[in-house]
């Protein structure tokens, strides 16, 4: 079972400079592309209140604050929240950021409080029941004219990749690059059903932070693109 302590240890082992290089001022081309895809999707604007759900070290709350919005973040990893507060102070945006240690399925905010919500690389870390509870809570705290952006791995692509590495393992003895953290992968069709059930209209697109052209291939993008980008609006 994956717990907050696993994430705490992960953050501690990486160190502060890694978080800056990966999320706040990304150096790697893939990290830059991930940030750009998500930020362009939720377009933070001055005066808006934006919630970063499963915020980790506060990436999109930070970038919201940089754009003049008020960035909020919630995560159940204490070390992640500590780093988020430290880095936002370091980059002089702590006056426009607030971070909360807590459960994303029980958001500690008033009804219709946020203009926008973002959840990047988060829903693959929770099970179906938790996803449904999360959707209900996001629906509650989102303004009627607001929207949600969710960025997550493409479940079909990951399953194909897993099968590929299992074959290589049998044929050549290659190590399988698996992670236990993505136990909550969900397909586009399954997530669409959850959204409808919880009063959201879903729009989706395919993205790929490593090979962007794969997300532009007609039909094939559904199985080859690395990432899914969902936009949810209240119905």
Image (tube, rainbow, N blue to C red):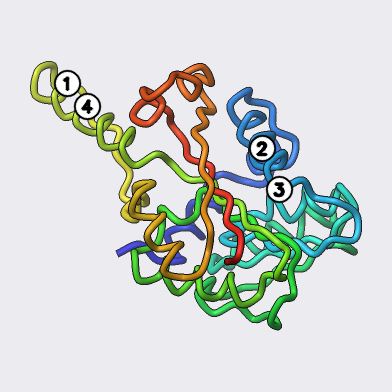
Tell which circle, 3 or 1, labels the residue nearer the N-terminal end. Answer: 3
Per the image, label 2 sits on a secondary structure element best described as helix
Tell which circle, 3 or 2, labels the residue nearer the N-terminal end. Answer: 2
Where is residue 173? Give x, y as percent: 14, 22
- Total tally of numbered discs in the picture: 4
Where is residue 217? Give x, y as percent: 44, 18
The N terminus, quarter of image: bottom left
Of all residues, the one furthest to the left in this rendering is 170
Tell which circle, 4 or 3, labels the residue nearer the N-terminal end. Answer: 3
Per the image, label 3 sits on a secondary structure element best described as helix
Image point (71%, 76%), residue name: 112
Tell which circle, 1 or 2, labels the residue nearer the N-terminal end. Answer: 2
Q: Which residue is mark 1?
A: 168
Which marked residue is nearer to the observer: mark 4 or mark 3?
A: 3
Image point (22%, 28%), residue name: 175
Q: CA distance from mark 1 to mark 2?
A: 32 Å
Q: Which residue is mark 3?
A: 42
Where is residue 31? Give x, y as percent: 61, 32
Where is residue 101? Give x, y as percent: 61, 73
Q: CA distance from mark 4 to mark 3?
A: 34 Å
| Relative to 185, residue 113 above or below | below
Image point (40%, 70%), residue name: 130
Residue 24, by quadrant, is top right
> Left or right: where does residue 206 sit relative to residue 154?
right
Q: CA distance from mark 3 to mark 1?
A: 39 Å
Q: How crowded is the residue under tag 3: few (<14 C-alpha within 10 Å), some, or many (20+)?
A: some
Q: CA distance from mark 3 to mark 2?
A: 11 Å
* Label 4–label 1 contact, CB within 8 A: yes
> Which dot marks residue 35?
2
> Which dot marks residue 165?
4
């Amino acid at each position: 079972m994956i717990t907050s302590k696993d994430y705490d240890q992960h953050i501690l082992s990486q160190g502060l400079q890694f978080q800056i290089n990966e999320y706040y001022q990304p150096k790697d081309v893939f990290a830059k592309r991930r940030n750009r895809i998500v930020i362009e999707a939720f377009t933070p604007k001055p005066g808006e209140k934006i919630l970063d759900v499963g915020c980790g070290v506060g990436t999109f709350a930070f970038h919201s604050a940089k754009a003049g919005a008020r960035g909020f973040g919630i995560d159940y990893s204490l070390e992640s929240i500590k780093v988020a507060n430290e880095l936002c102070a370091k980059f002089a945006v702590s006056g426009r950021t607030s971070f909360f240690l807590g459960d994303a399925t029980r958001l500690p905010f008033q009804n219709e409080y946020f203009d926008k919500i973002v959840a990047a690389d988060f829903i693959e870390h929770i099970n179906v029941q938790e996803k449904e509870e999360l959707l209900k809570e996001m629906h509650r705290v989102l303004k009627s004219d607001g929207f949600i952006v969710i960025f997550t791995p493409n479940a079909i692509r990951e399953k194909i990749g897993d099968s590929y590495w299992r074959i290589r393992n049998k044929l050549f003895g290659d190590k399988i690059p698996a992670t236990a953290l993505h136990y909550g992968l969900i397909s586009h069709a399954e997530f669409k059903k959850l959204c409808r059930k919880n009063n959201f209209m879903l729009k989706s697109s395919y993205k790929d932070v490593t090979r962007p052209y794969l997300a532009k291939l007609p039909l094939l993008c559904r199985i080859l693109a690395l990432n899914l980008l969902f936009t949810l609006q209240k119905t």
